[in-house]
């Protein structure tokens, strides 16, 4: 448990530090573009799952899935991912007044595709009760590339946003490959259940599908709304503050969604006792989540207010407006 949570914490810190590094070395404008890529990948990702995600994770959790079924679902993800990535990116580029390089467009499309597939494969590993492997892969896709990117910015090896995106893409690809072969090994001896097929999985997961789309859209659509009347630089200052709140949210998700819920599903799978509201909301996992979120929030608050004040002087070399935003964020973001 400590190992898994430590990796998740390091990954969170690494991505947050990367946000600071991009702001310092590349500026708020590049941070704005980086934030748009993140938002697009997360929103599009919910459409990629086509309704299979929640149910296939439940089946893997209770050992009711097979290699054949997993392969079918992943094929759907790839087909939907390639289509939606290309369409989303091209529509967005056509609506923007600024010009983007072909390599940056390619990076954005690959991020959209690989981020979802790697997330799904990583969640499959957790659902298969291989929590240590899942935590390690999640660290690769969230923390390792962020650490390398921050180091590259610090040493001036990286001088623009594209190498950062390529490191992100490569880390996602590594997670997909390792996670898939690990999952195939776990299901190599499973026989195809007569009652489980692709259609039944889709029907069971479709309510969660629409719910996740609504949730992701409501969380990230404001970035595109902001861009309709503000610049990437102003968007970057917003994303800087938003990343603090997202860190707290991710800690809670790590404890509840990827660790607690698969165990609860396994416990009650063949039980004649129905799960109660108390079992879901009053347990050690909720208490652990609240405790970790509180500690994380206090740590960020202390760090931003007392440990990173020197960054305000470094940011001052940017535009006067950027310096004002930096002062505001460092002193007033909780």
Image (cartoon, rainbow, N blue to C red):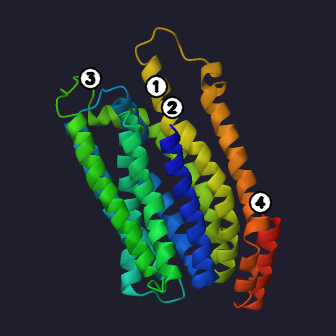
Marks 3,4: beta carbons within 8 A: no
Give the labeled residue for mark 1.
265
Tell me: residue 98, above or below residue 167. below
Choose top left, top right, bottom left or bottom right for residue 107: bottom left
Q: Position of residue 41 (x, y in %)?
A: 47, 63
Give the labeled residue for mark 2.
261
Marks 1,2: beta carbons within 8 A: yes
Give the labeled residue for mark 3.
195
Tell me the distance, in whole angstroms, between the alpha carbons under discs 3 and 2.
23 Å
Q: Which mark is residue 302?
A: 4
Q: Position of residue 13 (x, y in %)?
A: 58, 60
Residue at (29% x, 44% y) in the render: 73
Looking at the figure, which quarter contains the C terminus? bottom right
Tell me: residue 216, above or below residue 35. above
Q: Earlier in the sequence, mark 4 or mark 1?
A: 1
Tell me: residue 218, above or below residue 263. below
């Amino acid at each position: 448990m400590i190992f898994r949570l430590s990796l998740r914490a390091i990954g969170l810190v690494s991505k947050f530090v990367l946000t600071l590094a991009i702001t310092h070395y590349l500026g708020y404008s590049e941070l704005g573009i980086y934030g748009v890529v993140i938002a697009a990948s997360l929103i599009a990702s919910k459409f990629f799952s086509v309704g299979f995600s929640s149910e296939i994770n439940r089946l893997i959790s209770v050992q009711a899935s097979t290699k054949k079924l997993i392969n079918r679902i992943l094929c759907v993800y790839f087909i939907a991912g390639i289509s939606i990535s290309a369409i989303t990116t091209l529509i967005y580029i056509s609506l923007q007044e600024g010009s983007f390089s072909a390599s940056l467009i390619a990076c954005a499309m690959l991020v959209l595709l690989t981020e979802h597939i790697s997330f799904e494969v990583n969640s499959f590993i957790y659902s298969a009760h291989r929590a240590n492997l899942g935590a390690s892969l999640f660290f690769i896709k969230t923390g390792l590339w962020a650490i390398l990117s921050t180091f590259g910015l610090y040493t001036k090896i990286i001088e623009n946003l594209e190498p950062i995106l390529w490191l992100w893409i490569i880390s996602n690809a590594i997670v997909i490959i390792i996670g898939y072969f690990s999952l195939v090994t776990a299901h190599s001896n499973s026989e195809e259940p007569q009652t489980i097929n692709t259609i039944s999985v889709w029907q069971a997961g479709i309510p969660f599908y629409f719910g996740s789309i609504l949730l992701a859209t409501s969380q990230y659509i404001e970035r595109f709304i902001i861009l309709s009347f503000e610049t990437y630089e102003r968007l970057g200052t917003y994303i800087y503050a938003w990343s603090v709140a997202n860190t707290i949210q991710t800690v809670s998700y790590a404890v509840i969604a990827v660790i607690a819920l698969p165990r609860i599903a396994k416990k009650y799978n063949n039980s004649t006792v129905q799960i109660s509201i108390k079992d879901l909301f009053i347990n050690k996992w909720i208490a652990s989540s609240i405790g970790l979120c509180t500690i994380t929030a206090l740590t960020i608050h202390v760090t931003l207010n007392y440990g990173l004040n020197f960054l305000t002087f470094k940011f001052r070399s940017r535009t006067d407006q950027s310096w004002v935003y930096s002062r505001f964020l460092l002193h007033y973001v909780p």
